[in-house]
Amino acid sequence: MTIHVFLHRAGKSAIRRIAVLLVFVLALSGCDRGTPLQVVKAVAAGVPSLAPFFDEGSGLGKDQPVASRPVRGSLQQGDTPGLYGGSKQPTVCDVDKLEKFLTDPANDQKAQAWARALGITTGEIPQYLDRLTPVLLRHDTLVKNHDYKKGKAVPYDSLLQAGIAILVDQQGQPAVKCSCGNPLRPFTGDTNRISVKFGNGNKEWKGYDRSSVVAVRPAARPLQRIALVDVDDPDRGINRPVGTTGAKDDTFDTRRTEAVPGLTGRTFGEARQALADKGLATGYDTASAPADSARVTATDPPAGTELRFGQYVTVSVAEDSASGGTVTTPPPTQPSTPGPDGSTSRPPSSPPPSSSSGGPGSPSTSPWTPVPPSTPPPASPSVSVPPSSSSPAVTNSPPQTTTSAPPPPPPVTSSPPPPVTTGAPPPVTTTAPPETTGAPPPSSESAPEEPTASVAT
């Protein structure tokens, strides 16, 4: 009654203003309500599934106690160094036993549901399992899990605790939970908007940190081997060929350090691959993972810093413009500035060359190798004589007049002189090869707009 009287006295104009204000307030307060939190069921290590595909008492797989590690960026690729752990114990995951179970005609209904969840046919199960690799989670990991209920695979989002044994595919993507055989698929929600529910024996575990969960997306290319960290001895790494269970493992020292390469000017995708090739993980400090086309503006720690296997390098980026290849203004604050690499002087509008002649390693280890100019150098003064005319072109200088055209053709060529087409100009080739650490060459050598140096011969 009171509200009705108030509105009646206020008049139509006041009502309209109040309505606009209410809409504005509701819009602000409803931003988060528009994207509700995604419910995720917690799955603790060693806790049996309530609806497994495989009898967990048969010893198909065995979880191990592993403390979850912090991350820098909740979305990681399957080839991130140190993402997974390994063990010499053969009981981590018995792939042969899983294959025998799924190919048994008595379990055909389960096999059909299992294969359908993974997007394969029952006839493809043996070949699919042969390409999987057993690992141990080193991070609390988001996945789309599956229960087996009433003859069907029922999907649900879950958070697997570090220490759970899983099988990963050729691109490092979680594929099977070992202890119960339940198929796994990628988590497709927003990793920053989840609500983890603990229950059914899955109590909140020690060390659980909501900010340190990860979701895994496939690596950009199929893997030949997966570099793991031994969960029993973190100073030892395990190189496990894809599709093997441990018999062909090689070990390496995770304490061995690698220098952070110079990444400024590269795309985020290129930077991530360059770091992975050196055994370093890629981190980011934004709410979501940067686009692969985003240009790197800085790294923390800077280029040249020595890090051991699996340590993170946080990458700051500036998104490309819609026209492509143009770098926008970098964010006002960055974790660090490009210190010793000095690569901020490199023109941001030109992407790094696809190949390089400097130093060993991957083709992208020396993106700052000077690129020869794509246009020929300025022509000599004799070019002023038109080749098609037999009469003198310059009328104000009689002594220089010639009616024959033979002299001009040698310097007037339609292609650049030979020194330009062979790579970097001769004066700068003496210092380019030693730059194998990713640092840019001295500024005196990165001036492609001085074509006169290329025609010294």
Image (cartoon, rainbow, N blue to C red):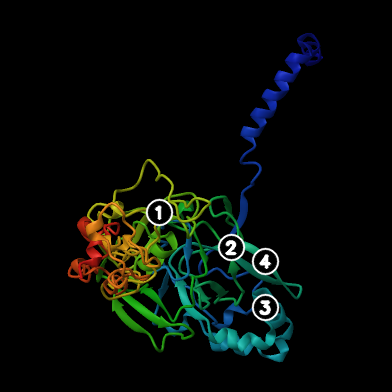
Q: Identify the residue position indicated by label 2 in the image.
A: 187
Residue toward you, 136 or 55:
136
Q: Indicate the quadrant containing the C terminus: top left, top right, bottom left or bottom right.
A: bottom left
Compared across the picture, whether 133 is left or right of 338 comes to: right
Write the residue at 54% across / 82% down.
59
Q: Identify the residue position indicated by label 4 in the image.
A: 155
Write the residue at 57% across / 56% down.
198
Q: Indicate the quadrant containing the N terminus: top left, top right, bottom left or bottom right.
A: top right
Q: Identify the residue position indicated by label 3 in the image.
A: 114
Q: Secondary structure at mark 2?
A: loop
Residue toward you, 299 or 110:
299
| Distance CA(mark 4)–CA(mark 1) | 46 Å
- Depicted 131 relative to depicted 405: above or below: below
Q: Amino acid at mark 3?
A: Trp
Q: Amino acid at mark 1?
A: Ser
Q: Amino acid at mark 2?
A: Phe
